[in-house]
């Protein structure tokens, strides 16, 4: 088998964190890959924006250029790795590569979540492959899992902790009772959060990832900007403590689920949730990620590991570089399932209502809940303080009714600012 | 893309639990697979031992035969699925299929763990593929993970809960304080344990699975019969309770690990272990399985899910049927790393020593430990009973010294029968 190694000649766009990781791993591991699989993977050309920038890796062995045509018009290059990020010019380069019969590997979640369908259709038309494992949770092989391992399954739901920044912050708040602000600061110091953390803490990053997973599982294109998204900015250490007393942890969950019975829609959303401590997602801590899915043949399956970082991402990219040389199918036969309005869904809820301690307060709150058809499952009124929060766990109720009740509650004179409503996953 | 479906014509050996699952899933999901991947998977021929046996599935659409040549000599059949189990005649059929240029998919862990190298070499020689995802933890895609997703990694260790029977029993003993015998009985009633459970509870099943995983991760053939194996028969609810008080759960762990620094060996074993509750494997409950691995690029990764059952196994087989049509590499370039003698390894230990409550007992025990170089980390002597067990957690020590000390302890007149020694994984 040594003699018949198949040669993969790679052109790389971008030499930032991911691109540099790809160079490092290829240098270190081409022997191993040849030995294990019989593929000879050779990086030939790197296209960068700026030739003069200092690089972490020695690029003397490669052709380094600012001209994309040096990759796109090189017939020897059969696999293009796009590691630039952002929509343009990544999208144009990928389209041109596919049209020229080159396989493409990308780690670009913004692009795939927004323009996946267009790119997959182009790949299919040109008989080439487009792989993107690194775009969701980097090294966790959830995309391969859905596309290959569970291909014979009808998948009913996917839920995950897909953002390391928010999970790090929530874990710190849980284990050390820290405030959101203080935990965020530590995340920034440790490199788990950006200087402007809004993309992560607001849930947008998770929305892009769940849009990609839903596309694969349900063959449907969903614009990530239309996914219902709540961030973790308003979660407090106090909420986490109360949730803990009732057997829950609070996690930022990204979820995509087929409608139960009633029609063809997809329930897709990103928001903090109370997760029962027994659920496998509850024990995913720190910057780690995990994705849990339900297939009708395999039941619940979870993948757990590092969801970001230079080397984990490069590991996934290299795996894809080899995969595209096989007949990996592109996503095909898209349908467009409607998103289900979150107002039409049912949850049980954790409510924290800071109230002025005065006779009749509980009566007024209970009345609002009752008139909206919401019944109380558990209630806790920690005493002693001037401002007493009322902690309520409800039975299942329609989101629309709960929102209506929550609005009314907030209008009561006895209810102070800072009321909290978090959905529960038992 | 609808027009150019590639046809996979399958011949199936065996119509027991797994074979029947394969028939069911193919009937139900060939449309889905065609739609998702463009492969037309068609089951043509089923070879069984006994034509007269009643079947769970209607086989009128297939050619059912007792003659293996109806599959092996049919040029139209390009993929052979072996679902008979056992070494012979499965091994001969697979060899003949490979020699005739057919890809092979098998769920047979006994065969792959014992004769994998021979079969892979034969597959390579004939330019065909041999896939076996279902042989380890059925639907959990750990083999694809090692072979494909983490192919650029140097894997340092794999450890897992790979046997559902023992995990079900230990979970029952943990959550309900039940005895081993009573938990085993429930496992048998629920179909999680065989009438003769010794293959599972003694750790042999786990040894075969870890031998397969080690073969993939380290490119080495290990005879599963040479793997150090201890079962769970001697674990008591009392040990589980004491371990719990110190922050551990007891799990049957199968493990394969590259030697740290000193040489080329592999540390491979199956035995009960105390696992820190924080470790992701600790929360794997009931009949579920999970495999945790460490790769140098991806760090710790875990796969979790159902490790047995008709449909999960069939799901993995069907995934493989499609995979073998691509250029999935066979395992190649075998080396033969020596197994490290467990006596040369170091662990910390949980010891339970039932003693007669008499002055000087602790002194005599402490002296034996000290002369063998074993130091005590924690000690608990629950009082009040006539026969008092002494519970000790040691610092790390060589297995050889611990065994020597444990033998000496058991010879003391003040030590009663039933002393326990379990290794700890922090």
Image (cartoon, coloured by chain):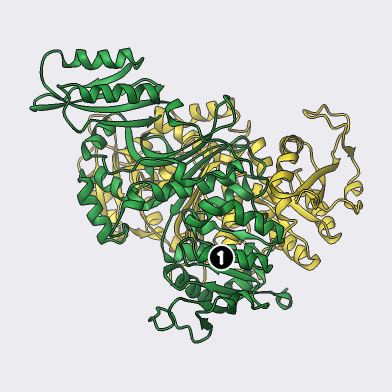
Chain colours: A yellow, B green
Q: Which residue is mark 1?
A: B92
Residue A246: image location, x then y, percent: 29, 42
Q: How many marks?
A: 1
Residue at image coords 59%, 74% = B10
- Residue occupying image coordinates x 55% and y 58%: B132
- Nearest the eye: A240 or B187: B187
Q: How far across and how far down the image is residue B424, in percent? A: 37, 30
At x 61%, y 54%, the residue is: B118
- Relative to B189, is A67 above or below? above
User: Would residue B132 appear left or right of B270 to someone viewing this image?
Assistant: right
The answer to whether residue B413 of the structure is visible from this angle is yes
What residue occupies the far bottom of the structure in this picture?
B60
In terms of image quadrants, where is residue A359? top left
| Residue A345 coordinates in the image, percent (x, y) | 42, 61
Task: Pick the residue in front: A310 or B215.
Answer: B215
Answer above or below: position of B313 versus B62: above
Left or right of B120 in this view: B415: left
Comparing A187 with B422, the one in front is B422
Circle 1 — which element?
helix
The chain containing the residue under callout 1 comes to: B
Image quadrant where one finds the C terminus of chain B: top left
The answer to whether B24 appears left or right of B329 in the picture is: left
């Amino acid at each position: 088998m040594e003699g018949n190694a198949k040669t993969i000649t790679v052109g790389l766009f971008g030499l930032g964190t991911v691109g540099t990781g790809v160079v490092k791993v290829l240098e270190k591991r081409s022997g191993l890959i040849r030995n294990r699989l019989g593929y000879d993977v050779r990086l030939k050309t790197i296209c960068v924006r700026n030739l003069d920038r200092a690089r972490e890796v020695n690029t003397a062995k490669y052709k380094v250029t600012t001209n994309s045509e040096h990759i796109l018009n090189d017939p020897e290059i059969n696999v293009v790795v796009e590691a630039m990020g952002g929509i343009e010019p990544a999208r144009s380069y990928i389209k041109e590569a596919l049209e020229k019969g080159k396989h493409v590997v990308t780690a670009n979640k913004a692009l795939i979540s927004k323009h996946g369908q267009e790119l997959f259709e182009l790949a299919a038309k040109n008989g080439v492959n487009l792989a993107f494992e690194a775009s969701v949770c980097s090294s966790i092989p959830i995309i391969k899992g859905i596309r290959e391992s569970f291909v014979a399954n009808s998948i009913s739901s996917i839920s995950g902790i897909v953002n390391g920044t928010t999970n790090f912050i929530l874990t710190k708040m849980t284990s050390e009772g820290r405030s959101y602000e203080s935990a965020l600061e530590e995340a920034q110091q440790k490199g788990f959060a950006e200087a402007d953390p809004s993309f992560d803490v607001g849930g947008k990053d998770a929305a892009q990832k769940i849009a990609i997973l839903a596309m694969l599982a349900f063959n449907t294109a969903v614009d990530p900007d239309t996914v219902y998204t709540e961030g973790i900015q308003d979660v407090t250490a106090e909420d986490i403590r109360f949730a803990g007393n009732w057997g829950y942890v609070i996690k930022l969950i990204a979820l995509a689920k087929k409608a139960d019975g009633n029609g063809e829609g997809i329930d897709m959303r990103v928001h903090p949730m109370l997760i029962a401590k027994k659920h496998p997602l509850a024990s995913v801590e720190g910057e780690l990620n995990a994705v849990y899915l339900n297939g009708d043949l395999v039941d619940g399956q979870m993948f757990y590991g590092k969801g970001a970082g230079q080397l984990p991402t490069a590991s996934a990219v290299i795996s894809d570089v080899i995969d595209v040389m096989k007949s990996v199918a592109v996503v095909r036969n898209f349908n467009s399932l409607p998103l289900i309005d979150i107002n039409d869904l049912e949850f049980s809820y954790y409510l924290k209502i800071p109230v002025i301690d005065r006779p009749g307060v509980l009566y007024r709150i209970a009345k609002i809940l009752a008139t909206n058809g919401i019944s109380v499952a558990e209630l806790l009124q920690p005493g002693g303080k001037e401002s007493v929060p009322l902690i309520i766990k409800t039975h299942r109720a329609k989101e629309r009714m709960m929102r209506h009740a929550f609005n009314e509650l907030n209008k009561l004179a006895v209810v102070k600012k800072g009321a909290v409503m978090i959905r529960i996953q038992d």
